[in-house]
Image (cartoon, coloured by chain):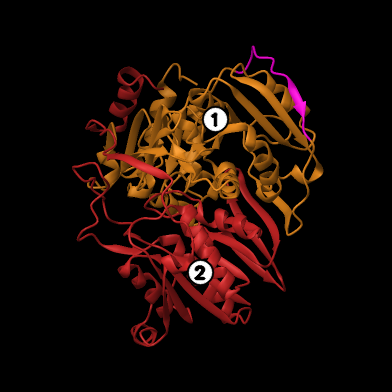
Chain colours: A orange, B red
Amino acid sequence: MAVLLIAEHNNKELRPFTLNAASAASQIDSDVHAVIIGQNTAEATKQLSELPVVKKVLSVEAAHYENFTAENFTPVIVKLAENYSHIVCSANTFGKNLMPRIAAHLDTSQVSDIIKVISPDTFLRPIYAGNAFATIKSNDAKKCVTIRPTSFDPCEISGGSAPIEKIDAGEEFSNTKFVKREEIKSDRPELGTARIVVSGGRGMQSGDNFKLITEIADKLGAAIGASRAAVDAGYISNDHQVGQTGKVVVPDLYIAIGISGAIQHLAGMKESKVIVAINKDGEAPIFSVADYGLEADLFEAIPQFMEELNKLNTIQK
Amino acid sequence: MKILVAVKRVIDYNVQIRVKEDGTGVVTDNVKMSTNPPDDNAIEEAVKIKEAGNATEVVAVTVGEEKAQETVRKALAVGADRGIHVKVDGILEPLAVSKILQKIVDKEKPDLVFMGKQAIDDDCNQTGQMLSALLNWPQATFASKIDVKDNKLEVTREIDEGLETIEINVPAIVTCDLRLNEPRYASLPNIMKAKKKPIEEIAASDLGVDVSPRLEQLKVEEPPKRKAGIKVANVAELVQKLKNEAKVI
C-alpha cells in the first residue's frame, strides 16, 4: 500500500517543510500520495502535483479548512487512511497538533519526530531532548509517523505531474472556532530552513539589545533565534525559540550569543554544522558543543564582530 | 466547572541523562525525578481558574508506578483538591495513557482536561490530542494564554508562525506550554495539608483498557558526539576562522 503525505501549506503555496516530509515519505515507500486540505488551494495543489516524488494528489477544499483546524482535518484523513500503510507529516506545530488525533482514531501508536527511516516499520527518533536516540519498530498495521524536517533533505520541486483528484469535504467540527492568527512577517529567511542562524539568550539583557542580533543577522542574511529564557523574559516573540519545546534548527552556521546552553536549548541546535558561542562565562555548557568559542562580553564582542564582517570583501548569502 | 489535570513523573529536567550500556533505555536508578515541567503549568492554570471563581474542583491524575504518586501529591500541595493514581508498572505508550484517561474522564465527568503539551522524557507530544480524539472533544494545544468565558475558552496557541487564537466549547482538552504561567512553589503548610487530601488508587487492569505496547524499542543509544572545538582569542580570529577554515561566511 502507498504512503499518504499530509501537505502543509498556507492555502496559497506549500510550506517548505512539506518538501522534507515528502522526501521522508518516499524513503518509506516509493508510492507516495499527498493530500492537501484547505480553501482556494489551486496554486499549492499544483505545486504539490509537480513534486516528482508525489504520484497522486488528493485535494479537499472547503471554507472550514481554511485555518487548518485539526478537528476538521482529522475525519478526512481517517477516511482516506484505509487505502494507505503510512500517514506522514512534519513534526512541527502543524503535524504535532494534527497527527495524534488521527492516530487515536486509527487506534495506532504514533511514532513522533523521526530523524531516519531504517525500514518501512523501523525508525530512529531522538528522546530526552536528543540526549539519546531510540530505534523504534511499529507493529501497528497502519503507521502514523511525524518526521523531523531538518533531518531530511527537501525533495525536488519540479518535473512531476501527478494527477489531481478532488475529494468531497467532510463535516465541520462545530466546537472549535478559529479566531485569529498573528504571524510575524519578516524578510529574513525562515528560522527552520535558514543557512545561518544568529541567536540571543538571557545575556542580551533586554529586548532593545536584540537589535544587536538583528544587525548581525541582516549582515549575514541569517534568521534570528533565541533561547527559551530570552522568550520568557519577553525580549523576543515565541516563534524565534530554538530548543526542545521550540524549533529544531540545523543551519550551516549557528551563532549563540549570551546563551548558556541548557540541555533544552542544545536539543534544538546541536546538529548545526558549525557552532559559534560568544559568552562571558567560560564555563557555560554552550562551549561544550561549540566549534569556535569566544569568551567575551557580548556588548563588546558584537560591535567588533560587525566591524570585522564589514572588512570582508564578500559574505556568502 | 471541574478540571482534571494529568501529570507525569519524569527524570528531572536538569539531569544529564545516561544511556544504559546494554542499550535498553536510560538510567533511572538514583536519578532525581520530578513532575514533567509543562504539567506544572497545567496544574497552576487549573488552580488559578479555581481561585478566580471559574472552577469548583481541580482533580490531579497520574498514570504510572508506585512512585508516580509523588506528582499527584505535589499537585495537591499547590492547590489541587484531590488526586487519582492509576497504577501500572512499566512504561505506557501515549495511546494507552489516553485510553486510561478516557476512562477517568468517563468516571469523573470533568468540563476541562489540562496537561503539559509534551513530556520531556519521550518527547512524544501526543497524549492530549489523542485523548481529545477519543472523546471527540475540541483540542487547544500548546496554550500560552487561556481566557475562561462562560462555557467557552479562548486559547492562544504558540505555533511555528507566531500565535493563533481559537475559541473552544467545553468540554475540551488543553495542552499547556511553559509560557502559560509561572508555577508556584508549595509552601510548607500546604505540603502538610496536602498529605491529608485524598488520593484514589485505581489499578489500570481494572479499567478494561488494552494497554499492550504497539511499538518495540529495539535499541537506545548515545547520539554521535560532536568533536571538541576550540576557543578563539578574539573577534578577529573568530571571523578569520569562519571565513577561511569553516568557510561558512
Q: What's the residue at 66%, 58% (across, down)?
A: B136
Crowding at mark 2 (Cα within 10 Å: few <14, some 14-19, many 20+): many
Chain label for disc 1: A
Chain label for disc 2: B
Q: Amino acid at mark 2?
A: Val
Farthest top residue in view: A159
| Residue A77 point in image, percent of width and height | 66, 40
Quarter assignment of residue B111: bottom right
Vertical comparison of B30 with A152: above or below: below
| Residue A234 point in image, percent of width and height | 51, 56
| Quadrant where the N terminus of chain A is found in the figure | top right
Identify the mark at residue B5; answer none if there is no mark. 2
Q: Which residue is mark 1?
A: A21
Vertical comparison of A188 with B59: above or below: above
Frontmost residue, B128 versus B50? B128
Vertical comparison of A71 with A307: above or below: below
Taken as a whole, is the magenta stretch helix, strand or loop? loop
Q: Amino acid at mark 1?
A: Ala
Crowding at mark 1 (Cα within 10 Å: few <14, some 14-19, many 20+): many
| Residue B49 point in image, percent of width and height | 58, 75
Query: Is residue A234 covered in magenta?
Result: no
Q: CA distance from mark 1 to mark 2?
A: 33 Å
Frontmost residue, A44 versus B233? A44
Quarter assignment of residue B128: bottom right
Q: What's the residue at 63%, 43% (across, down)?
A: A184
Q: Which residues are magenta?
A: A157-167
Frontmost residue, A305 versus B179? B179
Compared across the picture, whether B83 is left or right of B153 comes to left
Frontmost residue, A288 versus A141? A141
Compared across the picture, whether B5 is left or right of B12 comes to right
